[in-house]
Image (tube, helix red, strand yellow):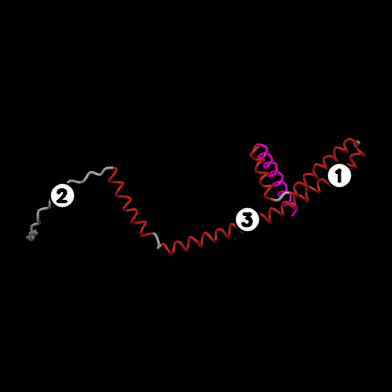
């Protein structure tokens, strides 16, 4: 094999002595990071005038949405209260109507119990009709605070009844 002569590279200047690396302490390490972070945040932040307009518009839209949702919820709660009052009143009427049958079949004493129960149910319907939705909600909150176990039990019972109603409604349709 033939060897070819390679030209020699030009002499490189001698490297400059490097300074000893600085020891980084916890203070200097954390001090350097916020400066870099603040520059990045400054670059990502849009001009103030634009953000203030967008922020104000979002706040206005959210307040409008909140007001509409509150009005819708109150209207639905008012309808629900009216229906519940009618249902409770119907139950009272049903109990009162059956009191005469109870008098004949079981005895007058038991018919009086039925009339007393009908009066209690009618009284509840009257109280329910007299209160506004906000007062009813506050009464419910107070009841839950005073006896949470009863409230949980009642919620479970209502959920069970509603589930049964939905199941039976689906099979009939």
Residue drawn at x 67%, y 42% is 155
In what element is the residue under mark 3?
A: helix
Q: Quadrant of the C terminus?
A: bottom right
Marks 1/2: CA distance? 103 Å
Question: Mark 1–mark 2 contact, CB under 8 Å?
Answer: no
Q: Which mark is residue 18?
A: 2
> 130 and 103: which one is in front?
130
Work out which quarter of the rendered image holds the N terminus and state it. Answer: bottom left
Residue, disc 1: 96
The mark that comes first in sequence, 3 or 1, is: 3
Q: CA distance from mark 2 to mark 3?
A: 70 Å
Residue 120, how many percent across, how many down?
A: 80, 41
Of 75 and 163, the residue lying toward us? 75
| In the rendered image, the vertical position of residue 169 relative to residue 117, given as above or below | below
Mark 3 or 1: the one toward you = 3
Q: Is residue 154 magenta?
A: yes
Type of secondary structure dominating the magenta stretch: helix
Mark 1 Cα-neighbour bin, 10 Å: few <14, some 14–19, many ≥20? many
Question: Which residue is painted at 13% across and 49% down in the image?
Answer: 17
Residue bounds of the magenta highlight: 149-173
Residue 46: quadrant of the picture: bottom left
| Disc 3 to disc 1, C-alpha distance | 38 Å
Residue 67, given in percent of the width and then of the height, sits at: 60, 58
| Residue marked by disc 3 | 70
- Closer to the chain start, of discs 2 and 3, is 2
102 vs 93, nearest the viewer: 93
Q: Do the residues bearing badges 2 and 3 touch, measured as CB atoms within 8 Å?
A: no
User: x and y percent of residue 74 in the render?
Assistant: 67, 54
Taking the spot 88% from the left edge, 42% from the top edge, the residue there is 99
* Above or below 6: residue 139: above
Identify which residue, 84 or 155, lies in the foreground: 84
Q: Residues within 10 Å of mark 2 (few under 14, many from 20)?
A: few
């Amino acid at each position: 094999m033939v060897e070819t002569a390679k030209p020699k590279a030009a002499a490189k200047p001698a490297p400059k002595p490097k300074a000893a690396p600085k020891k980084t302490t916890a203070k200097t390490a954390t001090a350097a990071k916020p400066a870099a972070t603040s520059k990045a945040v400054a670059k990502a932040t849009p001009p103030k005038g634009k953000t203030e307009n967008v922020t104000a518009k979002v706040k206005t839209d959210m307040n409008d949405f909140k007001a509409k949702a509150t009005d819708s919820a109150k209207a639905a709660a008012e309808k629900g209260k009216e229906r519940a009052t009618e249902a409770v009143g119907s139950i009272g009427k049903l109990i009162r109507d059956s009191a005469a049958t109870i008098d004949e079949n079981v005895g007058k004493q038991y018919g009086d119990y039925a009339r007393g129960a009908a009066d209690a149910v009618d009284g509840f319907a009257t109280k329910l009709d007299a209160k506004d939705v906000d007062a009813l909600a506050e009464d419910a909150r107070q009841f839950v605070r005073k006896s949470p176990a009863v409230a949980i039990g009642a919620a479970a019972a209502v959920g069970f009844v509603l589930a049964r109603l939905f199941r039976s409604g689906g099979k009939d349709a």
